[in-house]
Image (cartoon, helix red, strand yellow):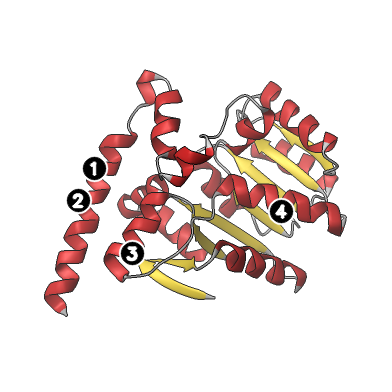
Amino acid sequence: MKKSSLFGIEITYGKREEIISEIERRLNNGEKMFIVTLNVSILMEAMKDPSYRKILEEASMVIPDGSGIVWALDVIANVKTDRVTGIDTMTHLCELSKRKGWKVYLLGAREDVAKKACENLRRNGVNVVGYHHGYFEKDGEVIVEILSKKPDLLFVGMGVPKQERWIHEHFKKIPVRLAMGVGGSIDVVSGRKKRAPEFVQKMKLEWLYRFLQSPWNKRKIPFQIMKFVFLVLRERKKRKRWD
């Protein structure tokens, strides 16, 4: 698969179908995968925190989730890529699990939300062997629970950067085929939150839709995006000077 670097982070890019097929191929070959679905929030966190950057560098695959990442790859590296969102990847993998007979575990969100997401997936034929809310203090109990259920796919929705840190810390001891941070996807699967309408997604304004749905005290995205745009344009200017 093709890769390009964005502020030092290697991103797998291309057509959505190509990236999904590559994930399937590697899973079928027995590779254990830790996937990061890169958006602006994750990249900005990595740029200010070296320990978090290292986690992204050690992931099996980093895929372009956010429209801001797609835009930045185009502006800085002249690379064209589809978005491969966390929720779409999770949905596809759940469908794949039905064909492969794989087991799924959900970790994250509130107790009632995780339970509802579990019920919805099971109703659709997905073998969800367990779930746990994301507001726990002791990792050990959760690890024991996951080990006892022996899932193939682990979806962790605890927000950035907590979910990637948690996966990275425990990845080697949990015998799963794949672990992936999915942010608010568990809320979406539960029905508690809705995805932006398709026309909004096509306009690349899904981030704005989520922003308007979020509480006032968490509305930081536009300021973060303005900073990101500045950094991207500055990086492009630097590269033009070097060329």
The C terminus: image quadrant: bottom left
Label 3 sits on residue: 74
The reply to whether residue 7 is visible in this rendering is no
In the visual, does 220 lie left or right of 193?
left
Q: Residue furthest left?
A: 241
Asked if 190 appears above or below 167 in the picture, the reply is above
Q: CA distance from mark 2 to mark 4?
A: 35 Å
Asked if 190 appears above or below 90 in the picture, the reply is above
Labels 2 and 3 touching (C-beta < 8 A): no
Q: Residue at x 61, y 64 (%)?
A: 17
The N terminus: image quadrant: bottom right
Residue 226 numbered mark, or none: 1
Q: Quadrant of residue 141?
A: top right
Other-residue count near label 1 (Cα within 10 Å), few / some / many at <14 / 14–19 / ≥20: few
Label 4 sits on residue: 93
Q: Position of residue 172 (x, y in %)?
A: 67, 59
Q: Quadrant of residue 182?
A: top right
Residue 149 numbered mark, or none: none
Q: Amino acid at mark 4?
A: Leu
Asked if 14 appears above or below 116 in the picture, the reply is below
Q: CA distance from mark 4 to mark 3?
A: 28 Å
Q: Amino acid at mark 3?
A: Asp
Label 2 sits on residue: 230
Other-residue count near label 2 (Cα within 10 Å), few / some / many at <14 / 14–19 / ≥20: few
Q: CA distance from mark 1 to mark 3?
A: 17 Å
Considering only order in the chain, which callout, 4 or 2, is on the residue closer to the N terminus? 4
In the visual, does 11 lie left or right of 49?
right
At mark 2, the secondary structure is helix
